[in-house]
Image (spheres, coloured by chain):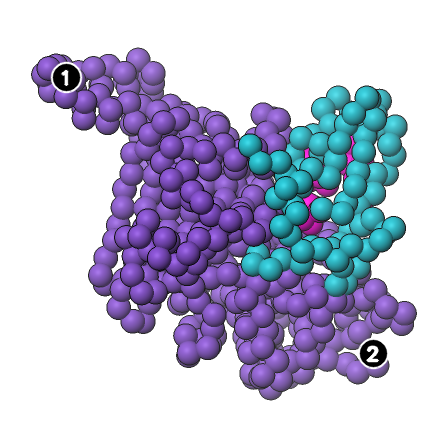
Amino acid sequence: MSEKFDVIVVGAGPSGNAAAYTLAKAGLKVLQLERGEYPGSKNVQGAILYADALERIIPDFRDSAPLERHVIEQRMWVMDERSFVGGHYRSEDFNKEPYNRYTIIRARFDKWFSDQVQKVGALVICEMTVKALLRNEQGRVIGVEVEREDGKIYADAVILADGVNSLVATQGGLRQDIQASNVALAVKEMIFLPRETVEARFNLSGQAGVVIELMGSISEGMVGTGFLYTNKDSLAIGIGCMLSDMKAQRTTPTELLERMKAHPAIAPLIAGGETREYAAHLIPEGGYKALPQLYGDGWLMVGDSAGFVNAVHREGSNLAMTTGRLAAETLIELFQNGNEPSAANLARYKAKLDDSFVMKDLKKYRNITDTLDKQRQFIGDYPNLLNQAAHTFLTVDGQDKQSKEKEIMAAFRERRSLFGLLGDAYRLWRATR
Amino acid sequence: MIKVEEKLYQNRYRVDAGLSHIRIKNEDVCNSRCPTQQCAVCCPAGCWSFEAGKIGLITDGCLECGTCRVVCDEFKNVDWNYPRGGYGILFKFG
């Protein structure tokens, strides 16, 4: 391709699409390259769409985007082997437009997002894998090389939105490869059921939906969580745990998911469903401390490629879209002022990130991964103790309530000691402040 | 328990016949030096096997997650690439 572009965007997931859309809408000449047959064909997510991040890019997205259900209820279940202690929040306020969160099916959603990108004038080429970055003598990134003969394509700047494995960035020396201790391996199934069955099982009507986040015994002592999301006529169910834990415990992920599906609180929700797809994906959960260099001479990194995931709140796609948008806005401002995309000028991207919820949230939880990794009682002991406590308290057997309370407290003290309990409260507070 | 092969059967793939996007750099390392064969344990698609003291890799059902490359951190013996454009897993839902 002899043509030169203002910007090349590598990858057509949420971050790449947000970047390409924002750039093309501002009138820049954009080329977006995607290795899949269609945008979305390589992408995996739970998936929850957070409206706010997309609204800032496409305000009227609700008119045409393929959305499954708007979320009116969030459940958090702390599991033990045969039980769970749960917190649910359901509100009619979440059942009013404009809705705040939606479940989506990524292959459909990404295709739609890419259509919007093309409508505002970006050139999107699928089935094209980027092999390497092109640099000039000064080391500035000036384009990409694709797997074709004479496959050199030039641009003033390159945005890397090529996902968690980001081979281009790693091989180009822009970042280190991801580490097992910084990524979760998630496996997921799409289970189809009649729409009425989904609605009856989850107490739903119309387009309303429920999401369930699962923790405790299902992760079998590993740092990780499970999820069960309602779509129109399907359920997305999956579990993700730190890969370093799976490695240490010699866990086979597909079996871990099978055991979670067999839990007595989960099995009836998915019973009779037909699994039509099985997917796996790495999630960069290293957080603030694992962030690589985010920009340099002629390049910017966005989304999963850079590790923009808030593991505590299960947020990723909104960070992806926001970082994609901010990278694009940085370039737009530079080009409008006639400035070069040098590393010094692109530092503005980092400043924008620092000023946004993205960096603020990642910074807030910068210690949580270490805390959970070292303090396994939060994963094993507490879920078990909580469930036992509920069981003791809710079993009517002639024992008086005060001695039941004593029994519960004794169980906590026995497992964690009084200082241990106080220490744990402090550790949890410190890890999330 | 449903086997991983049955799950993968539901997926759509465009297999690049004869061209594996993942390669073992040196099989001797897997067979003789690696004590754990974590790839065979953690691969969510069951692409890796270790039977009769020999490592095996068939990438037809690969979900392109990257796990085998990342868990092989002691020996870095996995040469991992994306399939050629358009080939490999084609998620219908993702």
- Residue B20 among magenta residues: no
Q: For the N terminus of chain A, which image quadrant?
A: bottom right
Q: For the C terminus of chain A, which image quadrant?
A: top left
Which percent across, then down, holds residue A295? 64, 62
Q: Callout 1: helix, strand or loop? A: loop
Q: Which chain is purple?
A: A
Name the subunit of mark 1: A
- Residue B72 among magenta residues: yes
Q: Residue at point 89% right, 72% down?
A: A150
Looking at the image, which residue sits at the far bottom?
A27
Identity of the amino acid at label 1? Asp
Horizontally, residue B29 falls left or right of residue A272, namely right
Horizontally, residue A273 falls left or right of residue B13, namely left
Quadrant in the picture for residue B16:
bottom right
Magenta: main secondary structure? loop
Q: Is residue A131 above or below residue A81?
A: below
Q: Residue at point 29% right, 27% down?
A: A386
Q: Residue at point 33% right, 43% down?
A: A76
Q: Is residue A322 above or below residue A432?
A: below
Q: Residue at point 62% right, 26% down?
A: A250
Which percent across, then down, holds residue A406? 17, 16
State the extent of the magenta-drawn residues as a range: B62-79
State the hue of chain B. Answer: cyan
3D distance between C-alphas at marks 1 and 2: 79 Å
Q: Which residue is mark 1?
A: A397
Horizontally, residue B89 falls left or right of residue A19, namely right
Which percent across, then down, holds residue B39? 71, 34
